[in-house]
Amino acid sequence: MAAESVARAGHSVTVLTGESTPGSKFLVAGRGGLNLTHSEPLVDFVTCYGEATTWMDPVLRRFSPDDLRAWAHDLGQPTMIGSSGRVFPEAFRSTELLRAWLVALDQLGVKLFRKHEWLGFDLAAPQIQEARFRSALGKTISLGADAIILALGGATYPRTGSNGAWVDNMRAAGVQVSALSPTNCGYQVPWTAAFRDQFAGVPLKNVCMRAGSMQARGDAMVTKFGIEGGPIYGVAEAIYAQGDQREVSIDLAPDLASITIENRVRAAKPGLAMGKLLKRCAKLAPVAISLLREITSNQIPRDPAQLAFLIKTARLKLGEPTTMAKAISTRGGIMHSEFDARFMLLARPGVFVAGEMLDWTAPTGGYLLQASFATGRAAGLGAVEWLESGRCTDLDLAGQ
Ligand SMILES: Cc1cc2nc3c(=O)[nH]c(=O)nc-3n(C[C@H](O)[C@H](O)[C@H](O)COP(=O)(O)OP(=O)(O)OC[C@H]3O[C@@H](n4cnc5c(N)ncnc54)[C@H](O)[C@@H]3O)c2cc1C
């Protein structure tokens, strides 16, 4: 997106990527459906970035979810709104959008060099906009340009090339980077063997998870190691704030008021087996019933008020988050204090930064890609402003 913005302004652009397939993470993101952005009102959308909301707000207003949808449409990839308000390309996956985008960039004259890994700035070089790369032929080369835009991603799914190796290089250049950690990820739960064997891979459908002041609704997935899925990602920041004492409160029947469940339990036939009682009074599926048994060490209360309370606020203790390799996104990155409104590094004038490598976080739902696109565009336009106050040269990579 940064490259496109600079090329559209009439400047010469070269993109270097460490991978042989450009957009590897974008392709992975689209595997189960590319959730490009969200259709909720912009005023709500912009509040989803936690502490980064203040600086992200104007950026998202300059390149909004509607702008992103129009951009995809112009590439011949119209979008649709799913039942949850999430926006997807009509083609659903990312492949066609990425293909159309690469063709458009090529038509704009953007040169693309694969398998060129950024190794950091040339600290000894007098020119500020000088960077070192390992080229496709394995040589270490130094390249200069009038502006450099880095969008090296976070550190999840490192096999896509987004491995966070840039952090040390960035710190070596005097740029402050807050520690990277996984977010929008699952958590370990020490299930009993019986529960794990029976329910790993089974979704807990239509639950509402709460932590701190956050709540999120949807389907969570029981895994061999714990729990993952949309509702837990939706409260990730509140779980993070709990430190090592992590837990979520799960409402297993979010469409039923507590008093309704309580009255139904009270009216049920005395002596009804607990499983049947939970199914009749709260429509709980076997996985939800067994989850209550796990949480209470098989001591589910029969008292109507206590039972209704348990169903509405089942407290599940969480262990460690899953590894970076399995997380959707990364918390931490280049701190906001390190770049200006053009996304230019204060320590390296002429170097711009964008995307998940910046210190912001958001839940899943299209917020991650929208912010990556919007900051990419902002960094591109920032670079244009810089270039138009300076000089522009071409990179010559022939034979490297
Ligand atoms: C499984 C999964 C599903 C997801 N689904 C969604 C979704 O549906 N909706 C959504 O909004 N978000 C989703 N995301 C998150 C989204 O993909 C990312 O937030 C987004 O791709 C970040 O964009 P970026 O350009 O900042 O970084 P990336 O897309 O990670 O791109 C960074 C690029 O930099 C390259 N690179 C890294 N280091 C170097 C180096 N040293 N030298 C050269 N090149 C380098 C990488 O190879 C990569 O091509 C998903 C993520 C995952 C893992």
Image (cartoon, rainbow, N blue to C red):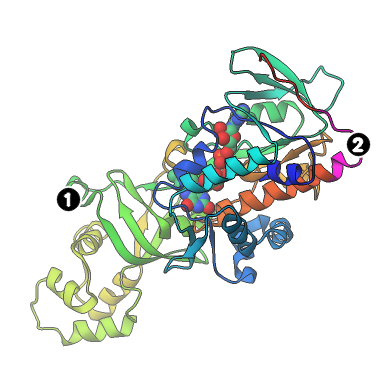
Viewer-closest of 288 and 387: 387
Q: What amino acid type is highlighted by mark number 1?
A: Gln
Q: Which residue, given by chain and number where applicable, does mark 1 sit on?
A: 198
- Gap in angstroms between the C-alphas marked 2 and 1: 65 Å
Q: Position of residue 385 (x, y in %)?
A: 85, 45
Is 221 on the left-hand or right-hand side of 230? left
Q: Earlier in the sequence, mark 2 or mark 1?
A: 1
Is mark 2 in CB contact (under 8 Å) with mark 1? no
State which quarter of the image contains the C terminus: top right
Q: Position of residue 187 (x, y in %)?
A: 39, 47
Where on the image, by quarter, is ligand 1?
Answer: top right
Q: Give neighbour class at mark 2: few <14, some 14-19, many 20+ (Cα, 10 Å).
A: few
| Magenta region includes residue 190 | no
Q: Which image quarter: residue 17?
A: top right
Q: Position of residue 162 (x, y in %)?
A: 54, 34
Which disc is residue 91 wearing?
A: none
Q: Which residue, given by chain and number where applicable, does mark 2 sit on?
A: 390
Q: Position of residue 312 (x, y in %)?
A: 34, 72
Q: Report if residue 393 is visible in the image.
A: yes
**SS at circle 1:** helix
Which mark is nearer the camera, 2 or 1?
A: 2
Identity of the residue drawn at 41% across and 42% down: 322
Q: What amino acid type is highlighted by mark number 2?
A: Gly
Identity of the residue drawn at 54% across and 28% down: 19
Q: Which image quarter: residue 332?
A: top right
Is 172 on the left-hand or right-hand side of 322? right
Q: Which residues are magenta?
A: 385-393
